[in-house]
Amino acid sequence: MSESPERRQAIWARLRPRLATFGYLGFIVLCWAFNWLVMKLVVPDIGPISFAALRLVGAAATIGLVLALKGERLLPATGEVWPLAWTGFLQIGCLFSLNMLGLQFVPPGRASVLVYTMPIWAIVFGVWLARERPGRRKLWGGLVGLLGLVIFFDPRLVDWHDARVLFGNAMLLLSALLWALGAVLYRRRRWQSQFWPQVFWQLSGAAVPVSIIAFVLESGRPIRWTAVLIAALVYNWLIGTGFAYWCWAKVLTEVSAATAGQIVMLVPVIAFLLSAVFFGEALTLQVLVSVGLILLGVLLTLRASVRGRD
């Protein structure tokens, strides 16, 4: 017996938000994975911190303009201006800047995997700063991820005699550490501000110090305004930051941040595969095992958060 039109409409009404949510998540994953390749392409054209500064300023201006046109407030709640600026500098400013520093010497696939070890380091900062007591699943996740990281730094995969390569890897790991620190500090507070003013103010708060650092350290380095650089900036302003964060806000209305975070862990996987195709990054068995262990550790950590085993 065929279903009535009313029942089909009711089923579709329930499914449509979920399908849209996974569509948004799919877009975010592809957008952020592809951006690792985009950032690598502009390394010859601009100083790394200068690119991060332009990315932050443009993204903040884009989101601020949209909020202003919609008549929404730009400032966060009273007392949250400086805390948001500080966590924004750690989570976004340091992340963007150190990523670009690392990408000068490290291929984008490897870079993305190192940066996405963030949830593993968040365990350490959570214990230290928030007095969290991680459950068994989180601890196992951290240990598995660290084992993968040790393999990832095997001398057969990393040239320990090349100071530039070591510097690049160190900057990417530092990026993950500061991202984790910023995330733990952010999570410790109950925020009164709405999502978009928070995003705008974190971007703005990060843009100021990063721009100052770029001016001090890279003012003597010329910027080559190539088509690739301009396209990369526009991509980051409108798609990689603006539209991607809009999609993220839509996702969080349907699923928890921890659940969405597990799916976003596909970013380094896809970035690594894209890097292998376009940059010839090696896909040896040892590389695949180490990447697999790192991602498994991160997923175990995130799954523990989803199940409330903190």
Image (cartoon, rainbow, N blue to C red):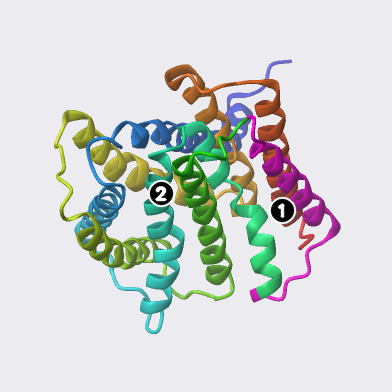
Range of the magenta residues? 129-156
Question: According to the image, label 1 marks what residue?
Answer: 306
SS for tag 1? helix
Label 1: how many Cα within 10 Å (few below 14, some 14–19, many 20+): some
Q: Is residue 117 above or below residue 121?
A: above
Disc nearer the start of the sequence (1/2): 2
Q: Is residue 137 above or below residue 77?
A: above
Q: In this view, does 294 lie above or below 307?
A: above
Amino acid tagged 1: Val
- The residue lying furthest to the right in this view is 136
Seen at 36% across and 34% down, the residue is 40
In the rendering, at what x and y percent does residue 157 appear?
Answer: 61, 31
Label 2: how many Cα within 10 Å (few below 14, some 14–19, many 20+): some
Amino acid tagged 2: Tyr
Seen at 33% across and 47% down, the residue is 242
Q: In which quadrant is the N terminus drawn?
A: top right
Question: Is residue 109 a member of the stretch shown in magenta?
Answer: no
In the rendering, at what x and y percent does residue 177 appear?
Answer: 56, 58
